[in-house]
Each structure stands twice: as C-alpha cells, then as structure tokens.
Image (tube, helix red, strand yellow):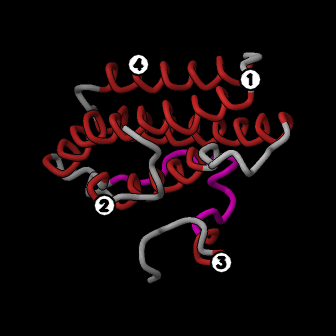
Amino acid sequence: MGELEGWNDCWSVGVDGIDEEHRYFIYLLNQFNGDGSDVLSGERLRAMAGELLTYTEEHFTNEEKVMEAAGYPLYDDHKYQHDLAEDEIRHAIASTMPEQEFRAFLGRFMLNWLVLHIQSSDQKLSAWLHENNVQYERLFDGIISGRDWMKLGRDDGRFPILAAE
C-alpha cells in the first residue's frame, strides 16, 4: 500500500463519532508523509509524534470505554490491538531511528495499520453497535478532544472533514 492521502469514504464504519475521530487520526499520521522537501527538525518531529500519541491514547480510550460499557464481546481482542499500536508509537518516539525512517514508520506503517484496523476490527465494532442499538458517544474527554479540532479543517482546508452542518 502506498502513501495515503486524506480520508477515503470506503474507510467509514458508519458511526459518525468514530469516523470523525478516524479522520483526525489519519490527518495526524499524514503529517509525517512528505516528499522530502519539508524538512522538519527532530524536535518538531518528536512534538508531532507526542501529539499523535496523546490523540491515539484518547481515541482508543474512548472506543474502549464505549465497548466496555456496552458489553462488547470482542473487547479484549480490540483492546489488545490498541495496546500494541500504542506500544509501537511509544517505541518509535523513544528510538534513535533516523528522521526519514521515523517519518516513514509513522506516516506509512502506522497509517496502513490504522486503515487495516478500521476495515477489520472497527467494522466489526460498528456492526455490533448497530445491531445492539448502542450509540457511540465520547465517554472520555481528554486534552486534545478539549480543543475544537474539528474546526481545524473548516478554517484552513488542510483536514478533509464531513460537510459543514
């Protein structure tokens, strides 16, 4: 799978809250992709990775709280996948890998992981939520979710989001 750009509707799981969170997740990961002309300092890359990790933890925690509260039968497996992804991001941040390798890991490997996770585990979760009439609501309000991050795309056009209300 090559470099991914923006959101693709085929990744939608049919749950607005999850899809919105995934759109931002993909936006964050795509910041690491580039043509090499956008030289970023190691410090800036680590700061971007820190924001990615914080958002990853928040998104996963929210999904997990919804799954746990609803009694989702595949909770343990889904949480295990989340834990592995978080560990991979933490490992990358702590590593001394060269800039290009670091960017490729987060911008391609983790982006591809997320898309595969959406198309498999999150699709199963979505189907189960629909079958059991469970509404997806943000049950965790963390640091990044406290910002008006959905306004980002409406203001500067960098982040493709759902059509304005």
Ranked by sequence position, the earlier of labels 2 and 3 is: 2
Ranked by sequence position, the earlier of labels 4 and 2 is: 2
Residue farthest left in this picture = 131
Q: Position of residue 27 (x, y in %)?
A: 55, 54
> Magenta part mainly helix, strand or loop?
loop
Q: Identify the residue position indicated by label 1 in the image.
A: 98
Q: Nearer the viewer, mark 2 or mark 1?
A: 1
Ranked by sequence position, the earlier of labels 3 and 1 is: 1
Amino acid beneath label 1: Pro
Amino acid beneath label 2: Asp
Q: Position of residue 22 (x, y in %)?
A: 45, 50
Q: CA distance from mark 2 to mark 1?
A: 33 Å
Q: Position of residue 70 (x, y in %)?
A: 30, 38
Is residue 32 in the magenta section? no
Ranked by sequence position, the earlier of labels 4 and 1 is: 4
Q: CA distance from mark 3 to mark 4?
A: 36 Å
Q: Nearer the viewer, mark 3 or mark 4?
A: 3
Q: Which residues are magenta?
A: 136-150
Q: Is residue 52 above or below residue 109?
A: below
Ranked by sequence position, the earlier of labels 2 and 1 is: 2
Residue 80's disc number: 4
Q: Identify the residue position indicated by label 2 in the image.
A: 9
Where does the C terminus fall, quadrant-wise? bottom left
Q: Nearer the viewer, mark 4 or mark 1?
A: 1
Number of other residues with Cα within 10 Å of mark 4, as a class: few under 14, some 14 to 19, many 20 or more:
few
Q: CA distance from mark 3 to mark 1?
A: 33 Å
Disc 1 element: loop
Q: Quadrant of residue 90?
A: top right
Amino acid beneath label 3: Asp
Residue 155's disc number: 3
